[in-house]
Amino acid sequence: MKLFLSVTIVALGRRMGYALAAVTFTNVILVHDSVADAVLGAARPTLAELRDDSDHRCFIFPAFDGTLITSKSIGLPWHWNVEVPPAKLQFLPSPVRRERHEYRPWQRALFGATVAVKVPDQVVRKVRMRYADRLGRWGLTAPVGRQAPWQFPRSGASVRG
């Protein structure tokens, strides 16, 4: 369980009259205040004292060429405990993992296609920001909250509607 979620659950339990008793890899165990003395004694452990997630921390750093560097492999504990090595986490294919000013035309095309397939919303946003003045001159912008003229209606009506 993520630490911030655990903190929230413990705080909610505290407001409802529960005390933290223990934590597991995925759970927080709370007991009602009426039985807390019998279960825990005088000690009231904190989440920070009970939870050690240092084995599950992984730091990710993007290198100048687009390679993702991780501090260790990523484990998928709910999927046969599969270990995903850092090489399999890469966003960019290896031919375009270099500085962008070194790209050949085919690498620029591959980079653009990769980004368009993996994060299309960011490509649309980038194009709109870059060409906003031209789109406005051509009448292709729409007020916020309205459908833009270039977005095709699903009913099969004409583009200009």
Image (cartoon, rainbow, N blue to C red):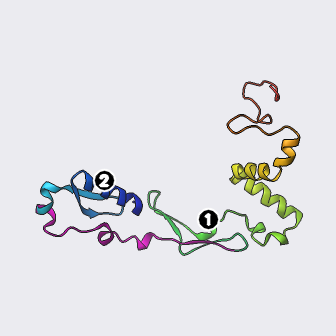
Q: What residue lies at 33% left-to-right and 55% top-to-bottom?
A: 9
Type of residue at label 2? Leu
Where residue 100 sits: x, y (%)?
Answer: 80, 69
Q: Is residue 30 above or below residue 151?
A: below
Could you say which is closer to the camera, residue 133 or residue 152?
133
Residue drawn 70% across and 52% down?
Answer: 122
Badge 1 density bin: few <14, some 14–19, many ≥20, Cα 10 Å: some
Q: Residue at x 78, y 24 (%)?
A: 157
Up the image or down, 112 lies above or below 148; here it is below
Q: Which mark is on residue 111? A: none
| Residue nearest the observer in this picture, 157 or 72 | 157
Tell me the residue that label 1 is attached to.
89
Q: Measuring from the top left, give residue 46's x and y in whole percent.
A: 28, 68
CB under 8 Å between discs 1 and 2? no
**Which picture quadrant has residue 85?**
bottom right
Range shown magenta:
38-63
Q: List x then y, in percent, for residue 92.
A: 71, 63
How packed mark 2 is, by other alpha carbons closer than 10 Å (few <14, some 14-19, many 20 or more), is: few
- Residue 40 colored magenta? yes
Residue 129 horizontal side relative to residue 62, left or right: right
**Which quadrant: the C terminus?**
top right
Tally of numbered discs: 2
> Is any part of residue 5 visible from this angle?
yes
Nearer the camera: disc 1 or disc 2? 2
Q: Which residue is mark 2?
A: 12
- Please name the amino acid that badge 1 sits on: Leu
In the image: residue 63, left or right of residue 136: left
Q: Is residue 13 magenta?
A: no
